[in-house]
Amino acid sequence: LKRKIFFSHQFVLKHEKFSDMREVAEYPMSICPTHPGSLPLIREMIDQVLALHPNTTYFHIGADEVSSRKLVHRLLLY
């Protein structure tokens, strides 16, 4: 079963509690891949979505929002 499920990091990153995970502090559109809390948060979000759709066989995470890598100092190391 293929399912198109929309969720955005912006939904989470707009909250102060998660603002340190933003790729660029002023913009809550994308999560910083080098932040230590990013992967656990993404896994939790995916687990929650898949729990609601247990017959899903394909899951597309999108990740097409990343357009500001050159603005993030810690990402210049990669």
Image: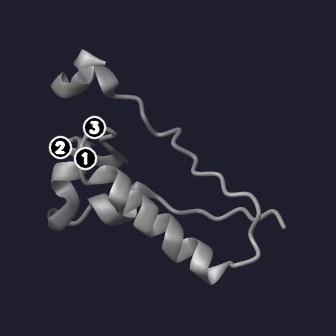
Residue at horizontal 71%, vertical 62%? 4
Location of mark 3 (residue):
34
Q: Quadrant of the N terminus?
A: bottom right
Q: Dot 2: within a 10 Å radius of its alpha carbon, few (fewer than 14), some, or many (20 or more) residues? A: some
Position of residue 10 relative to residue 62, above or below, is below
- Residue for point 30% across, 41% down: 32
Q: Which residue is drawn at the image coordinates 16% and 66% (left, top)?
A: 17
Q: CA distance from mark 2 to mark 3?
A: 14 Å
Identify the residue shown where x is 57% and y is 51%. Answer: 61
Query: Are the residues flagged by discs 1 and 2 in contact, CB closer than 8 Å?
Result: yes
Q: Closer to the camera, 29 or 5? A: 5
Disc 1 on helix, strand or loop?
strand
- Quick check: can you spot residue 39? yes
Residue closer to the observer: 52 or 67? 52
Reading the image, the residue beneath label 2 is 25
Cα–Cα gap, marks 3 and 1: 10 Å
